[in-house]
Amino acid sequence: MNSDSFHNLGIPFQKGMEYEVKKSFNNFQEKERYTYVGSQAYGFGDRSIEGYEHFFHDADHEKLQAWRVSNDLLEKEAPLYFVKVGGWNMDVRNSILPIDTNRFDLSEGKKLLNPYIPT
């Protein structure tokens, strides 16, 4: 199972979206913002999937944070801890803009890539 297929399970996180922590837990601090970067499945010895470890980038502290949660608890706990505050449809400082590869014109390369170049 690849890391994108979990969206079919009702998991609320999307890559590149920015989330704010509602209340502190584990290494996540209340009111801090994190960009979701993906997940990795973990499971039992028989290769069945027990849950996912979700990874978030903390841009302010240049750290990668992880949250390991079982499948049966994720849908219930994610809304308790996280709220989406930015992403492709919201202008927020740490959100990652997508590149539309269907309309990517190389003649405009530098102009299109400027948002991805750190200043």
Image (cartoon, grey):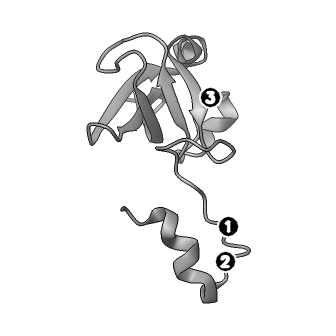
* Mark 2–mark 1 distance (CA, rounded to whole Å): 6 Å
Do the numbered discs 1 and 3 sit on residues whose CB atoms are within 8 Å? no
Which residue is drawn at the image coordinates 58% and 46% (left, top)?
4
- The residue tagged 2 is 104
Asked where in the image residue 104 lies, by quadrant, the reply is bottom right
In this view of the protein, which residue sits in the foreground, 20 or 45?
A: 20
Q: Secondary structure at mark 2?
A: loop
Q: Nearer the viewer, mark 3 or mark 2?
A: 2
Do the numbered discs 2 and 1 sit on residues whose CB atoms are within 8 Å? yes
Quadrant containing the C terminus in the rendered view: bottom left
- The residue tagged 3 is 12
> Looking at the image, which residue sits at the far right?
103
Above or below: residue 91 compared with residue 13: below
Which residue is drawn at the image coordinates 69% and 45% (left, top)?
89
Q: Position of residue 94 (x, y in %)?
A: 46, 44
Which residue is drawn at the image coordinates 62% and 28% (left, top)?
12
- Report whether 28 appears left or right of 23: left
Pointer 1 local density, CA inside 10 Å: few below 14, some 14–19, many at least 20:
few
Which comes sooner in the sequence, label 1 or label 3? Answer: 3
- The residue tagged 1 is 100
Q: How many marks?
A: 3
Asked where in the image residue 63 lies, by quadrant, the reply is top left
Q: Secondary structure at mark 1?
A: loop
* Mark 1–mark 3 distance (CA, rounded to whole Å): 23 Å
